[in-house]
């Protein structure tokens, strides 16, 4: 296997983010030194994927703390609150961003000196990143038990190393099954409009030598009917513990409906930082992105002048279409997720 993909890391007082907008053609890291720059990178999707934007948000707060000239804890807290607001107003759907920002802000309440607080905040952000990598390895280990030798696996969007601190959630399970010697073929949906499947998932899997075939999103049901797909594995941007609904990249719901019709297990892989213990489906904001993403592909217009487009970035899959949710803590049926709050 090739060296591991690092979508984000901290070095020499700055964070480095692999610019995912340029993949698979170009590998270029952005050097970010302020929370504002991090917020822009999240908004413009240089960094994307639920856990990865959570880590980036935490690192954004760490940059504010690290570079702050505040003389008192109160001054530092005021700066952190401004960065917190900027970072949380970037993307509304993935819960990991809010989870990570809250976690760092909680640490900021520690009673200590300004210098100690600065260090504690950076440590917490780094810990969030390390824990995510560890969680992905565990998700891979847990989930690979559900994969059989010879499986054809459908995946959607990118829930890989690029969407996380590394290794990946859905792709973590695929990696773990492959490392165990299982012969699998991955069918990666291209994932219009932004093509995360074509640009990112296909790139990640090819790098690791994992057999992958790229398909357009509308081919999935036909491949299920033909018997080429035995499992569907996707990531998640938010899983609602109260109701068991799974919010993930637009197109996930169609795959879940087709999988149910053809009796194919529909698996969702995500760390517990993706579980929202409070909200119901109507309370979640589904991000609406610029219609240009639908009207253009790689800068080229593909529709008649004047036509308008819709661009919801995520959809909501009801629990009866979901077979299992695989987290670092274990494998759950959607209705069992509530119990997780008791152990978290
Ligand atoms: C990303 C997306 C991914 C999940 C993966 O959307 O929908 O499937 O974030 O999360 P976008 P996880 O590219 O718009 O950010 O890796 O936790 O399963």
Image (cartoon, helix red, strand yellow):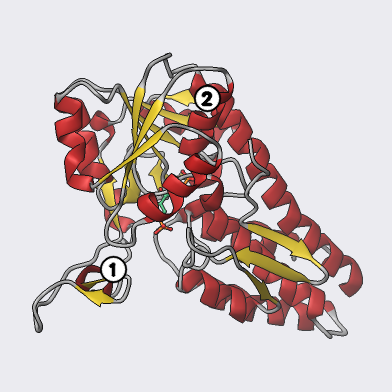
Residue 169 appears in the rendering: yes
| Residue projecting furthest to the top | 149
Q: Nearer the viewer, mark 1 or mark 2?
A: 2
What is the crowding at mark 2: few (fewer than 14 residues within 10 Å), some, or many (at least 20)?
many
Horizontal relation, residue 219 to residue 179: left or right? left
Which residue has dot 2 on it? Answer: 178
Dot 2 falls on a residue whose secondary structure is helix
Horizontal relation, residue 5 to residue 20: left or right? right
Whether residues under marks 1 and 2 lie with C-beta atoms below 8 angstroms apart, the answer is no
Quadrant holding the N terminus:
top right
Kindly identify the residue that appears in the image at 36 percent across and 51 percent down: 198
Kindly identify the residue that appears in the image at 66 percent across and 44 percent down: 4
What is the crowding at mark 1: few (fewer than 14 residues within 10 Å), some, or many (at least 20)?
some
Could you say where residue 328 lies in the image, as x and y percent from the top left? 58, 31
Residue 328 appears in the rendering: no
Ligand 1 within 8 A of label 2's CB? no
Using the image, determine if residue 195 lies above or below residue 176: below
Q: Earlier in the sequence, mark 1 or mark 2?
A: 2
The answer to which of 312 and 293 lies nearer the viewer is: 293
Q: CA distance from mark 1 to mark 2?
A: 36 Å
Could you say where residue 202 lies in the image, as x and y percent from the top left? 42, 46
Kindly identify the residue that appears in the image at 35 percent across and 29 percent down: 153
Tell me, for residue 288, which label it has, or none: 1
Q: Quadrant of residue 242?
A: top left
Dot 1 falls on a residue whose secondary structure is loop
Quadrant holding the C terminus:
top right
Using the image, determine if residue 221 lies above or below residue 249: above
Could you say where residue 271 lies in the image, as x and y percent from the top left? 54, 40
């Amino acid at each position: 296997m090739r060296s591991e993909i690092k979508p984000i890391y901290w070095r020499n007082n700055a964070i480095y983010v692999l610019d995912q907008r340029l993949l698979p053609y170009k590998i270029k890291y952005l050097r970010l030194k302020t929370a504002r720059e991090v917020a822009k990178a999240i908004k413009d999707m240089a960094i994307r994927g639920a856990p990865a934007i959570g880590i980036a948000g935490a690192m954004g707060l760490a940059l504010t703390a690290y570079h702050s000239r505040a003389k008192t804890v109160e001054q530092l807290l005021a700066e952190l609150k401004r960065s917190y607001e900027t970072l949380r107003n970037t993307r509304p759907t993935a819960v990991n961003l809010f989870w990570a920002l809250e976690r760092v802000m909680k640490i900021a309440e520690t009673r200590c000196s300004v210098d100690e607080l600065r260090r504690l905040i950076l440590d917490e952000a780094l810990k969030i990143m390390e824990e995510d990598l560890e969680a992905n390895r565990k998700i891979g280990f847990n989930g690979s038990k559900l994969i059989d030798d010879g499986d054809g696996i459908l995946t959607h969007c990118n829930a890989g190393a690029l969407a996380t601190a590394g290794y990946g959630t859905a792709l973590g399970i695929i990696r773990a099954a492959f490392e165990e010697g299982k012969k699998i073929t991955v069918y990666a949906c291209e994932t219009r409009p932004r093509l995360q499947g074509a640009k990112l998932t296909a790139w990640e899997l090819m790098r690791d030598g994992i057999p992958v075939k790229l398909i357009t999103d509308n081919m999935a049901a036909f491949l299920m009917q033909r018997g080429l797909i035995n499992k569907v594995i996707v990531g998640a941007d938010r899983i609602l513990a109260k109701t068991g609904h799974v919010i993930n990249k637009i197109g996930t719901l169609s795959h879940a409906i087709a999988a149910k019709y053809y009796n194919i297990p529909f698996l969702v892989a995500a760390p517990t930082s993706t579980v929202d213990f409070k909200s119901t489906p109507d309370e979640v904001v589904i991000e609406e992105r610029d219609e240009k993403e639908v009207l253009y592909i790689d800068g080229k217009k593909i529709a008649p002048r004047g036509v308008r487009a819709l661009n919801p970035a995520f959809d909501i899959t009801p629990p009866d279409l979901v077979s299992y949710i695989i987290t670092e803590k274990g494998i759950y049926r959607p209705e069992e997720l509530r119990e997780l709050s008791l152990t978290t």
